[in-house]
Image: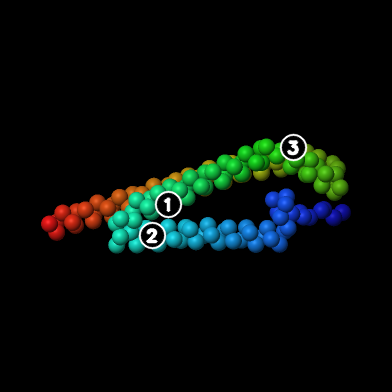
Amino acid sequence: MPVQQMANCCGCVRLKAGVLIISILWLIDGLIGSLSNIFVLASREITDITDLVTDFAYGIAGAEIVVHVYMIILIIVHRSSIMEECERYIETTSPEFGYACAQGYNYSLTFNIAYAIVVILLSVYFAMVVSAYARKIREETETQKEQAE
């Protein structure tokens, strides 16, 4: 028996537009990450930008935290509607697998929490690495200025 396909992205946007929006957001995320790395490397030449780069890295880490916590909250808040949709699809395909919805929901929530923890820890760690590198460059520049005087 055929299972109904998803009709909308986020419940209100047509699939084609949703895919385009998601792709653009992923592209922007990649560009932001690349630009932050370029700024860090360029900051070796421009020491005034090191504080900005550090703030930018911590800003990205903060955004990661907000996005992943929000995603987990959405999954928890919309549990009943997720379960209802799942059970409706399960009933049309195979009624004896009613437990699959609860199990799938629990696995999904567990995976999202574990994934969020890993991504958040990596983001914070990378921000700390950027901060340490910026501090090192600042100290080297100050040492060079003192030696030049």
Amino acid carrying mark 2 in the image:
Phe
Identify which residue is drawn at 33% across, 59% down: 43
Mark 1 lies on a secondary structure that is helix
Whichever of labels 2 and 1 marks the residue nearer the N terminus, that label is 2
Q: CA distance from mark 2 to mark 3?
A: 45 Å
Q: Position of residue 39 (x, y in %)?
A: 38, 59
Q: CA distance from mark 3 to mark 1?
A: 38 Å
Write down the residue under mark 2: 39
Write down the residue under mark 1: 56
- Tally the marks: 3
CB within 8 Å, label 2 to label 3: no
Q: Position of residue 107 (x, y in %)?
A: 67, 42
Bin the neighbour count of mark 2 within 10 Å (Cα to Cα): few under 14, some 14-19, many 20 and up.
Answer: some
CB within 8 Å, label 2 to label 1: yes
Residue 49, picture quadrant? bottom left
Amino acid carrying mark 3 in the image:
Ser
Bin the neighbour count of mark 1 within 10 Å (Cα to Cα): few under 14, some 14-19, many 20 and up.
Answer: some
Amino acid carrying mark 1 in the image:
Phe
Q: Report the mark closest to the observer, 3 or 1.
A: 1
Q: Nearer the viewer, residue 114 or 130?
A: 130
Identify which residue is drawn at 82% across, 47% down: 89
In the picture shown, does residue 57 fall above or below 113? below
Write down the residue under mark 3: 80
Q: Position of residue 116 (x, y in %)?
A: 55, 44
Residue 80 appears in the picture as rendered: yes
